[in-house]
Amino acid sequence: MDFELSEEMRMLKDMSYKFAQAEIAPLSKECDEEEKYTPEIRKKAAENGLVACWVPEEYGGAGVGILGNTIVTEEISRIDMGIGLNVYAAAFGCEGVFYFGTEEQKQKFIPPVCSGEWVSAGAFTEPNAGTDVAGYRTRAVKDGGDYIITGNKMFITNGTVCDWMLVQAITDPDQKAHKSFSQIVVPADLPGITRNKIPGKMGIRSSNTAEIAFEDVRVPQENLIGKEGSGFYQLMHFFDVTRVMVAGQAVGLSQACLDESIKYCKERTAFGKPLGAFQLSMKKLTEMAIKIESLRNVIYKAAWLIDEGKPDYHLAAMAKFLGGETAVFCANAAVELHGGYGYIDEYNVQKWYRDAKILELYEGTKEAEIMTIGRVLMSK
């Protein structure tokens, strides 16, 4: 059993962090305050092979797999999780096309995303259905050689900046819920699509999040991904992959909280001693370090299994659950260790505190992960 990263992965890890320090750090505060999306960062990242880097080289990616993608996500999230989403989530939706699409669909939709020319999105969540995937109501009705799509989507990452989106829609309402859905690639500029940015988020404020309405949107049936009626199972596979990425965000943010807290505890004095000399401070730092190390090992194993062709949705759910829990814990501990200074925007920890909470919400709430893991345990 080898826990060492390969030379390629170590170089990727180092390069990703240096890119984030040079390109993202100077814009972090401004983009957070102004809820500013950063297409120029995405394009620079693409030039360095950091966008959709999991995609094989024949489709325009760097070919470093899900483990490599997770490492990139981790290192960029150490600097800014919101701007980071503009990089590593620029390819949301490509997972479905890559794993279930035809060769023609892969060649058409994936390479422009890897190059930074296009942005994709996964249009899944609806206003009244998030974790309850079977509750989605968006419809796609056949009409000649097209689908006519009607419905609404909510909290869609890249919603107003994407060039195409992978839409989850009901194609056969007479089937049982899990067999009624299909996934269809929908160009974002088609007539009948309305996209509105959602402002005022607590965290990841530089990431683009939107609500989308489809009103009789006509899409050619050739844009169907996989077989009709297999959309639910394709979506579950999507989550197997993206939950590992979200956990990568969590370990990156948690590591940043620990690093910043150690630095502060060495510099800040209380009662004539460095803050880090006190046992209660050591306890917080130690608990952060233990949780981060545990999380990183779970994430890397889950990512490695995907690359080996043996994805484990049980472990992916564990990584996602532990990731959210760890990030929230570490961000809270970092603010507490900084005291009053942790509550003002002069220090990064207050931003990380705001960013951390989303990790317990998107790509499946922590309650959804508990149900996923619990069902597996009870089936044994």
Image: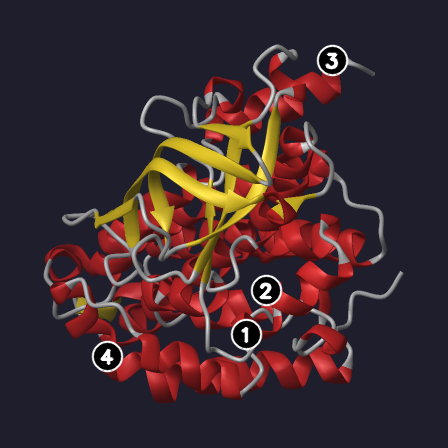
Residue 207 visible, this angle = yes
Mark 1 Cα-neighbour bin, 10 Å: few <14, some 14–19, many ≥20: some
Asked if the residues shown at circle 2 and circle 3 are in contact, with their CB atoms under 8 angstroms apart, the answer is: no
Find disc 1 in the rendering and name its residue.
112
Mark 2 Cα-neighbour bin, 10 Å: few <14, some 14–19, many ≥20: many
How far apart, in angstroms, are the residues tagged by discs 4 and 3? Answer: 47 Å
Q: Quadrant of residue 9?
A: bottom right
Q: Position of residue 138 (x, y in %)?
A: 43, 27
56 relative position to 208: left or right: right
Find disc 2 in the rendering and name its residue.
109
Q: Residue at x 41, y 57 (%)?
A: 285
Q: Nearer the viewer, residue 304 or 142?
A: 142
Q: Quadrant of the C terminus?
A: top right
> For numbered disc 3, what is the local secondary structure?
helix
Q: Amino acid at mark 3?
A: Met
How far apart, in angstroms, are the residues tagged by discs 2 and 3? Answer: 40 Å
Q: Quadrant of the N terminus?
A: bottom right
Q: Position of residue 18 (x, y in %)?
A: 46, 87
